[in-house]
Amino acid sequence: MVPKEDAGAAAASQPSDAGSAASTSPKVANLSALRAAVDRAGPGGVVSLFIRLDPKTAPPTADERKAALASAGFGPQSVAGDIVTLQMPSDRLEALLAIPWVSSVETASVVKPR
């Protein structure tokens, strides 16, 4: 589980749910799926996500991207270019959306090679 106390400045201090800012954010690809994932995880649970980063403003290397997300209280798993798989505490969605270089968020799913 990712510690919530390690939230960095970029990920701000507000508690979150899949509500207010998420419902109006252009960063959220499928709000109903995201809300369902947060609901399934429950309080204190973890949600698996894919996030896309803005390559112009995100930290330049994969290691720096992972470190910045980890210091903001998230659990980055894999980085492939501007796509990151991430473990997010279920109450941290608003903080994730507040990171300026996170350009989109969607629930993770199984990806099969073509």
Image: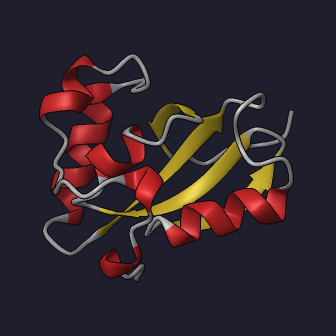
Q: Nearer the viewer, residue 14 or 30?
A: 14
Q: Nearer the viewer, residue 85 or 58?
A: 58
Q: Which of 84 and 16 is in front in this view?
A: 16
Picture coordinates of residue 85, whole percent (x, y): 62, 54
Picture coordinates of residue 82, whole percent (x, y): 76, 38
Tell whether 113 sits left or right of 31. right
Task: State the colouring used for the structure image.
Answer: secondary structure
Tell whether 49 sits left or right of 98. right
- For the C terminus, which image quadrant? top right
Q: Residue at x 59, y 36 (%)?
A: 101
Residue furthest out toward the front: 9
Q: In this view, does 44 lie above or below 17?
A: below
State how many labels appear. Answer: 0
Q: Which residue is drawn at 21% across and 40% down?
A: 35
Tell whether 68 sits left or right of 12. right
Picture coordinates of residue 12, whole percent (x, y): 32, 53
Q: Is residue 9 above or below residue 33?
A: below
Q: Is residue 4 above or below residue 59?
A: below
- For the N terminus, which image quadrant? bottom left
Image quadrant where residue 52 sits: top right
Q: Which residue is drawn at 19% across and 53% down?
A: 14
Q: Which residue is drawn at 16% across and 57% down?
A: 15
Image quadrant where residue 44 sits: bottom left
